[in-house]
Image: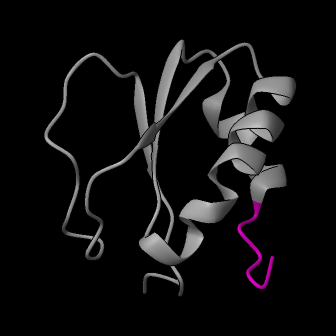
Amino acid sequence: MDYDLELKKLPEIIKGKKKVLIQLPDGLKPQAEQIVNFLEKKTESEIFVWAGSCFGACDIPNVKGYDLIIQFGHSSLR
């Protein structure tokens, strides 16, 4: 993986959440299974991957039923 997704920080953020949705840009979607496996091993959460578009920080899925949505990107949001 060419990006530091800071996965090691996420279990603490996810702690206590039952259903978590992660949103990845197309360039990171090939790593989706690896990310889900890591997070499910480190948390007691059910991790889902948004298969739709992701065109930036303003493109948040309009979905209900998740306790947390985590959006990954290629660069830091400032």
Q: Main secondary structure of the magenta part?
A: loop
Q: Quadrant of the N terminus?
A: bottom right
Give the image's coloring scheme. one colour
> Residue 17 location in percent, x, y?
55, 18
**Relative to 71, is 26 above or below?**
below
Can you tell which quarter of the image residue 21 is in? top left
Q: Which residues are magenta?
A: 1-6
Residue 69 magenta: no
Q: Is residue 37 above or below residue 29?
A: above
- Foreground pick, 27 / 66: 27
If the image is split into quadrants, where does the C terminus sit?
A: bottom left
**Number of numbered discs present?**
0
Q: Nearer the viewer, residue 51 or 61?
A: 51
Q: At 58% from the left edge and 70% from the top edge, which residue is drawn?
A: 28
Q: Measuring 35% from the left and 22% from the top, which residue is drawn there?
A: 66
Q: Quadrant of residue 59?
A: bottom left
Residue in the picture at 54% in, 12% down = 18
Is residue 2 one of those drawn in magenta?
Answer: yes
Please say if 12 is above or below 1: above
Say whether residue 78 is left or right of residue 35: left
- Position of 41 compared to 47: left or right? right
In the rendering, at what x and y percent does residue 52 appear?
27, 52
x then y, percent, for residue 61: 21, 47
Q: Residue at x 68, y 23 (%)?
A: 15
Q: Quadrant of residue 38?
A: top right
Q: Residue furthest front?
A: 30
